Image (spheres, rainbow, N blue to C red):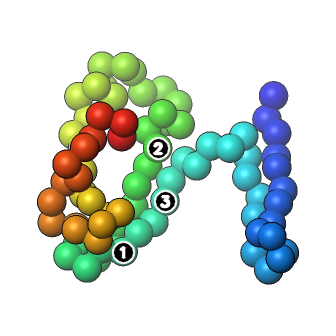
Amino acid sequence: MMRTYHGSCHCGAVRFEAHCGVRPYGIGNSPRYGVFYGVNVASLDGVSDEDLAGTPITYVDGRADNWISPPTETRYL
């Protein structure tokens, strides 16, 4: 069953609507690569486990603003 959740920040200045709590995609901006798009591959329909397992992954450490190198820890990503 599809559910829609509504909410806002503590003061109500920012409002949002989320469907099932899944974020299917995101848009970012890297100083090195410019605008990029990320896709939550787990939200794609019709993609086999084999295709997902063979998909290349590029890790960048945006958390530390180090867009050139991957983070030192990637096991939880």
Quarter assignment of residue 27: bottom left
Q: Nearer the viewer, residue 37 or 69?
A: 69
Q: Earlier in the sequence, mark 2 or mark 1?
A: 1
Residue 71 place in picture, x, y as percent? 23, 52
What residue sits 49% from the left and 59% below the top?
A: 26
User: Few, some or many C-alpha atoms within 10 Å of disc 3 (few <14, some 14-19, many ≥20)?
Assistant: few
Percent x, y of residue 42 = 48, 33
Picture quarter containing residue 28? bottom left
Pick the front one: 5 or 55: 5
Figure quadrant of residue 76: top left
Going by the image, does 30 lie left or right of 56?
right
Q: Is residue 15 visible?
A: no
SS at circle 2: loop
Q: Is residue 22 above or below residue 34?
A: above
Q: Identify which residue is drawn at 82% across, 39% down.
A: 3
Instruction: Decide if residue 18 is on the left or right side of residue 64.
Output: right
- Relative height, residue 30 to residue 70 (above, below): below
| Element type where label 1 sits in the image | strand
User: 55 above or below 59?
Assistant: above
Amino acid at circle 2? Asn
For the residues marked 2 and 3, what is the alpha-carbon distance in whole angstroms? Answer: 8 Å
Residue 64, disc: none
Q: Amino acid at mark 1?
A: Asn
Location of mark 2 (residue):
40
Is residue 76 among what the camera can see? yes
Among the two numbered marks 2 and 3 on one chain, the one whose residue lies closer to the N terminus: 3
Numbered circle sitting on residue 29? 1
Q: How many marks?
A: 3
Q: Which mark is residue 26?
A: 3
Graded by Cα atoms within 10 Å as few (under 14), some (14 to 19) or many (20 or more), the crowding at tag 2 reads few
